[in-house]
Each structure stands twice: as C-alpha cells, then as structure tokens.
Image: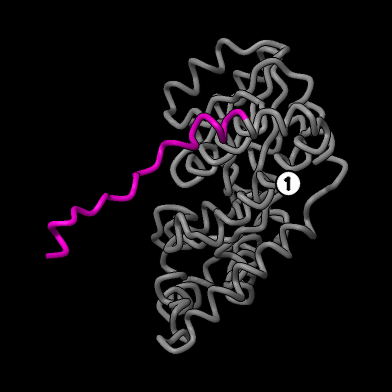
C-alpha cells in the first residue's frame, strides 16, 4: 500500500518519537481511522505536535489527509457484496447500539435528565450530520413537554450562546468532538453560566474538555464514511434514552404533552380521495 511504502521510505530519517508514530500507524491502521488526534497521542505516548509533524514530513497536509489516504486504500467495502450488505448493515446497527450502551455512564445520564428538568432554557447545538440529530432531539423533547431549540447554523449558535445564562442548558452533539464552530459556541455558553452537556465519541476531545456532563457515543466514522447512518444511530439511541428518562421522571406532564401534540397534528393527513360513481362506468 502506498502510505505504508511511503512510511518505510522515510523511516530511517525519522526521529525516535516519529518512529513510534510510524510503527503505530502500520500496526493499528484500522484503529487510526477512528481515533482523534488526542486519542492517537495518548496511545502512542507522544505529543500531538509530533504526529502532525510526522504527517507533514511524509507529504500529507495533516492527520486527516493521512487518514483519508488510509481509508481510500483500505477499501472498507472490499469484503462486502450485493448478496450480504443487508445482513452487514443490520449487524453494524446492532453492534453500535450495544457498544454505545457499554460506554454510557448511567449516572451521567441521570444527571443530564435532572439538568433538563431544572433548567428554563435548552439549546441544542450541532453541525452537519450531527445537526440532524439535534432536530430529532428537539422534536422528541417537544412531544413530551420540554420546549427546546435546535441551532445548526454556526453564527446562530454563537448568538444564542452569547445570550445564555445560568438557567440555560446547552446540549452539544458532535461525533468527533472537534467541530470548531460548535466548540466555540459551547465555550461561550459555558462562560455565560450555562450547563454544557456533550454527546461525543471521544473523551479527550476539545468538546469533552469544556463539558459539565459527557455522554459517550460509539458511532465510528472514517473520512470516507462521513454522515453514515450507523454513526447517527448511536447519537439517536442516546437521545432516545434522554427523552425516555425525562418522560418517566414526570409521567403526568409528559403524557399530557403527548396527548396535546398528538391531537394538534391528528388531522394533518391527506384525506382519501372520494371516488366518483362515473369513474366506475
């Protein structure tokens, strides 16, 4: 493979720390695809700057460029055929839900539910595919009586963050935990006194470092799988847990909200077309 040949070509000229990076990438290439820069640094026991410098030395534009090269050459569809892809996707969905359950901290989940119960204002921040997850969370919470606002535009995230108070709860969603605009908005919200809750894959991510509460997801993505359904299912599973826990905490209010919202939308369906007797002639 080209990237391995490239690493081997540069290997003699690498520093001791850079050789550790090279060895790790060759031995753990499948893991590297799904690790953040900070996770890689922790596993290899080198500084993040060393990994970035290693990538530049090999001619890559950065860590993401290296990952893209690895994922492009290690085609993840090489063992997938038209005959087995249905079973493969089913297996991946079941696996990601199970793995998310394993990494989820029940105590943190309870604290998140308590936070939603106590706060007066809830904003949901997310960009790209994670923005879709915030829209789903807004819909679910609204139906059980908790009015929230999903904000997926980066400028609006900053403006909403600037108006946060100690009575605000911000739920920020990002698989990587490194989306610059959303991290910045969450930081501003925290500085203004808001409680920041983060849903992310990476405990060492910039998002996680500013969070008051963290709920880990397990939806892995490589650079070629951006926005994959399996990754979103991990987020939606955690959102479902939050909403269900919130509803169970105040059953009467949630049930009343469900009935009111259901009744409000009950008639919003297309009526069956009435047949004209002449049509039967």
Q: Residue at (40%, 71%) from the top-left corner?
A: 72
Residue 56 x/y as whole percent: 44, 55
Name the foreground residue: 218 vs 90. Answer: 90
- Write down the region rendered in magenta: 260-281
Residue 245 x/y as whole percent: 78, 40
Q: In this view, does 120 lie above or below 266?
A: above
Does the magenta portion include 86?
A: no
Does the magenta portion include 266?
A: yes
Residue for badge 1: 241
Residue 106 x/y as whole percent: 85, 46
Name the foreground residue: 52 vs 33. Answer: 33
Q: In this view, does 84 lie above or below 68?
A: below
Which quadrant holds the N terminus? bottom left
Name the foreground residue: 152 vs 269. Answer: 269
Circle 1 SS class: helix
Q: Quadrant of residue 43?
A: bottom right
Q: Quadrant of residue 163?
A: top right
Is the residue marked by circle 1 packed among few (<14), some (14-19), or many (20+) residues within 10 Å? Answer: some
Q: Residue at (72%, 23%) from the top-left corner?
A: 195
Q: Residue at (82%, 29%) from the top-left corner?
A: 114
Residue 183 x/y as whole percent: 57, 31
With 230 as the anchor, is 42 left or right in this view?
Answer: right
Q: Residue at (69%, 48%) from the top-left corner?
A: 238
């Amino acid at each position: 493979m080209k990237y391995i040949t490239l690493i081997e070509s540069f290997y003699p000229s690498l520093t001791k720390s850079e050789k550790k990076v090279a060895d790790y990438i060759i031995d753990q290439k499948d893991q590297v695809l799904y690790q953040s820069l900070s996770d890689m640094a922790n596993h290899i026991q080198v500084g993040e700057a060393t990994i970035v410098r290693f990538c530049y030395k090999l001619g890559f534009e950065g860590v993401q460029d290296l990952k893209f090269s690895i994922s492009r050459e290690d085609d993840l569809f090489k063992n997938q055929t038209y005959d087995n892809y249905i079973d493969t996707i089913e297996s991946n969905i079941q696996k990601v839900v199970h793995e998310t359950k394993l990494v989820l901290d029940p105590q943190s989940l309870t604290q998140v539910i308590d936070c939603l119960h106590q706060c007066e204002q809830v904003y949901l921040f997310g960009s790209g595919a994670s923005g879709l997850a915030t829209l789903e969370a807004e819909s679910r919470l609204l139906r059980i009586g908790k009015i929230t606002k999903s904000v997926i535009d980066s400028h609006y995230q900053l403006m909403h963050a600037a108006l946060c108070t100690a009575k605000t709860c911000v739920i920020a969603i990002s698989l990587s935990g490194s989306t610059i605009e959303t991290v910045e908005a969450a930081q501003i919200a925290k500085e203004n006194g808001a409680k920041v809750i983060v849903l992310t894959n990476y405990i060492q991510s910039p998002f996680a470092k500013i969070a008051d509460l963290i709920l880990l997801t397990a939806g892995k993505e490589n650079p070629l799988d951006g926005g994959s359904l399996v990754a979103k299912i991990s987020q939606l599973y955690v959102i479902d847990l939050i909403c269900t826990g919130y509803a169970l905490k105040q059953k009467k209010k949630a049930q009343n909200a469900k009935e009111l919202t259901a009744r409000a939308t009950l008639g919003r369906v297309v009526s069956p077309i009435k047949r004209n007797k002449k049509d039967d002639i």
